[in-house]
Amino acid sequence: SQISREHVAKPSDVLSIGQEIEAKVVDFNGEDKKISLSMKALEAPAEESTEE
């Protein structure tokens, strides 16, 4: 859910092993030794449509 603003069925559809990416650390759990990353957080915010 943090790969792209568009729907991605499987991460392997967009990413491959060994591929270098830029991502933002959004959570770190030292106890469980887990890091949550987000590529989506680095994208420009989606423009919101305004209704008049």
Image: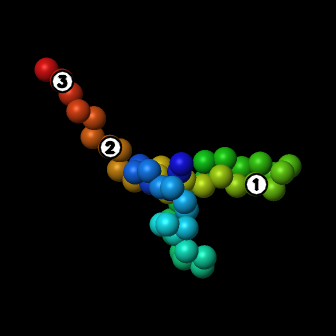
Mark 1, residues whose alpha carbon is within 10 Å: few (<14), some, or many (≥20)? few
Q: Are marks 3 and 2 in contact (CB under 8 Å)?
A: no
Outermost residue, top side: 52
Local packing at callout 2 (Cα closer than 10 Å; few below 14, some 14-19, many 20+) is few
> Helix, strand, or loop for circle 3?
loop
Does residue 21 sit above or below 39 in this rendering?
A: below
Q: Looking at the image, do the residues carrying marks 2 and 1 touch, with CB atoms under 8 Å apart?
A: no
Bin the neighbour count of mark 3 within 10 Å (Cα to Cα): few under 14, some 14-19, many 20 and up.
few
Q: Residue at x 21, y 27 (%)?
A: 50
Label disc, if present, on residue 11 of the rendered structure:
none
Toward the bottom, the furthest residue is 18
Q: Please give the label number shown on residue 34.
A: 1
Instruction: Identify the residue at horizontal 55%, vertical 62% (top origin).
Output: 11
Residue found at the very far front of the displayed protein:
9
Kind of residue sitting beneath label 1: Lys
Upstream in sequence: badge 2 or badge 1: 1
Q: Nearer the viewer, mark 1 or mark 3?
A: 3
Q: Image check: 28 left or right of 26? A: right
Residue 16, image x and y in percent?
A: 55, 74
Name the residue: 23% across, 33% down.
49
Residue at mark 2 to residue at mark 1: CA–CA distance: 28 Å
Q: Would you name the residue on which mark 3 appears?
A: 51
Secondary element type, mark 1: strand
In front of the other: 3 or 33: 3
Relative to 29, is 39 above or below? below
- Disc 3/disc 2 C-alpha distance (Å): 16 Å
Q: Which residue is mark 2?
A: 46
What is the spatial separation of the Cα atoms under label 1 and label 3, in whole angstroms? Answer: 42 Å
Residue 6 coordinates in the image, percent (x, y)? 40, 51
Q: Position of residue 44 (x, y in %)?
A: 35, 50
Q: How many marks?
A: 3
Q: Amino acid at mark 3?
A: Glu
